[in-house]
């Protein structure tokens, strides 16, 4: 766990810190384009400076009087520079094309498939039924096995979002009604952060996703834990919290597997306390933050679909205790 945490502190959200094949190809492109563009800029500025500062003898002859030698030299210089520009453009376009082709060729070797749906402003994540494990729904936290190709199927239910976990893969837009997909590989265990990369409304900046890359064993163990229904409340406080949750409207939007709550408007909360963050990474998963979020969601994410539910202080505490037990 501490290794995961340390990784999370350093290079967890940067296209310049690539931790997977897909991201590395893009990283190589970034440097190639950057180096070529910087060199071109330097050469251009150098030539411009030479032209500006070159000492010239006072012009004696008429501007209409052309020096054929000088004309030839100028034509030659401009022609060579144009040819070089075309060569550089063709080389960069070819490099970009082959990088894209090589990323596309990663498709087909996936061992895990997951469906990610964009909502204003959170990520719904669905793992399909596999073997004896049922299909599950979670939110804002994607778990993947290290070193394996993961197919991420993308779609949106409202506006255009963009899935971008820069350390692991390039961007891909989520366009309503036009499903797309990308292949993602993490070659090092760790926690990576992604961010919606297409302006999608008021809380676009609070639409982050966490990717947890872990060993195959840890991933399988996580997947099995997610397969279980929510724990049954074990004490009076938790029972009171569950009753308040089911009786006050929370259940209209949220599902908790194993209870009558089956709403699909908001995130599935069956294992909510097992996640690292709340409200698409707007808050850390702590009892205090959870209480603040439930007590007044609009003060944390103005415009979010979650309304303020009128709960007495005791009911609020009980709901937080109950939600905190759902690991
Ligand atoms: Cu979703 Cu920006």
Image (cartoon, rainbow, N blue to C red):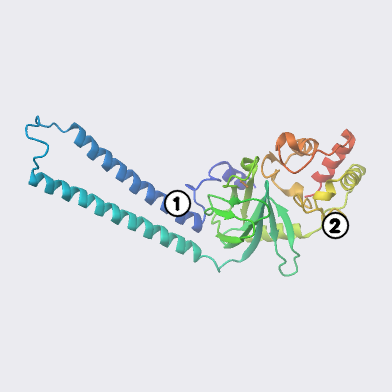
Farthest residue, direction left: 60
- Ligand 1 within 8 A of label 1's CB? no
Q: Left or right: where does residue 250 sit relative to residue 201?
A: right
Earlier sequence position, callout 1 versus callout 2: 1
Q: Which mark is residue 281?
A: none
Q: Left or right: where does residue 126 sit relative to residue 109?
A: right
The residue located at (9%, 31%) in the rendering is 57
- How many labels, in total? 2
Q: Left or right: where does residue 74 sit relative to residue 254?
A: left
Determine whether label 1 and label 2 are within 8 Å by CB. Answer: no
* Image coordinates for residue 317, horizontal then vertical, percent: 85, 37
Q: CA distance from mark 1 to mark 2?
A: 45 Å
* Image coordinates for residue 30, horizontal then vertical, percent: 42, 50
User: Considering only vertical position in the picture, is 299 above or below 140?
Assistant: above
In the foreground, 295 or 146 = 295
- Ligand 1 within 8 A of label 2's CB? no
Q: Residues within 10 Å of mark 2 (few under 14, many from 20)?
A: few
Label 2: state its secondary structure. loop
* Image coordinates for residue 64, horizontal then vertical, percent: 11, 39
User: Considering only vertical position in the picture, is 220 above or below 288?
Assistant: below
In the foreground, 128 or 303 = 303
Please name the residue that numbered disc 1 is placed on: 27
* Image coordinates for residue 122, horizontal then vertical, percent: 68, 48
In the foreground, 324 or 58 = 58
User: Considering only vertical position in the picture, is 215 above or below 140?
Assistant: below
Q: For residue 236, which quarter of the picture?
A: top right
Please name the residue that numbered disc 2 is placed on: 258
Q: Residues within 10 Å of mark 1 (few under 14, many from 20)?
A: many
The residue located at (64%, 59%) in the rendering is 177
User: Considering only vertical position in the picture, is 145 above or below 197?
Assistant: below
């Amino acid at each position: 766990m501490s290794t995961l945490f340390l990784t999370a502190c350093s290079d967890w959200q940067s296209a310049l810190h690539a931790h997977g094949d897909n991201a590395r190809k893009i990283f190589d492109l970034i440097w190639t384009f950057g180096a070529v563009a910087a060199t071109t800029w330097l050469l251009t500025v150098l030539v411009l400076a030479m032209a500006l500062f070159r000492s010239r003898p006072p012009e004696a002859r008429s501007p209409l009087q052309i020096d054929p030698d000088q004309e030839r030299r100028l034509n030659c210089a401009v022609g060579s520079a144009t040819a070089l520009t075309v060569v550089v453009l063709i080389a960069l376009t070819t490099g970009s094309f082959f990088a894209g082709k090589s990323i596309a060729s990663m498709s087909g070797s996936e061992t895990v498939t997951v469906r990610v749906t964009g909502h204003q402003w959170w990520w719904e994540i669905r793992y399909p039924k596999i073997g004896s494990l049922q299909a599950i729904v979670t939110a804002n936290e994607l778990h993947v096995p290290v070193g394996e190709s993961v197919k991420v199927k993308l779609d949106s239910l409202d506006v255009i979002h963009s899935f971008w976990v820069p350390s692991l893969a390039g961007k891909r837009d989520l366009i309503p009604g036009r499903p797309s997909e990308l292949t993602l590989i993490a070659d090092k265990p760790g926690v990576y952060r992604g961010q919606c990369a297409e302006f999608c409304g008021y809380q676009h900046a609070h639409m982050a996703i966490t990717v947890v890359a872990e060993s195959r064993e840890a991933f399988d163990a996580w997947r099995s834990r997610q397969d279980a229904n929510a724990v049954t409340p074990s004490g009076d406080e938790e029972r009171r919290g569950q009753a308040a949750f089911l009786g006050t409207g929370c259940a209209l939007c949220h599902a908790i597997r194993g209870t009558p709550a089956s709403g699909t408007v908001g995130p599935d909360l069956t294992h909510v306390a097992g996640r690292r963050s709340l409200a698409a990474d707007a808050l850390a998963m702590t009892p205090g933050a959870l209480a603040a979020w439930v007590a007044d969601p609009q003060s944390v994410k103005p415009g979010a679909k979650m309304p303020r539910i009128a709960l007495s202080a005791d009911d609020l505490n009980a709901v937080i205790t109950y939600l905190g037990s759902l690991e």
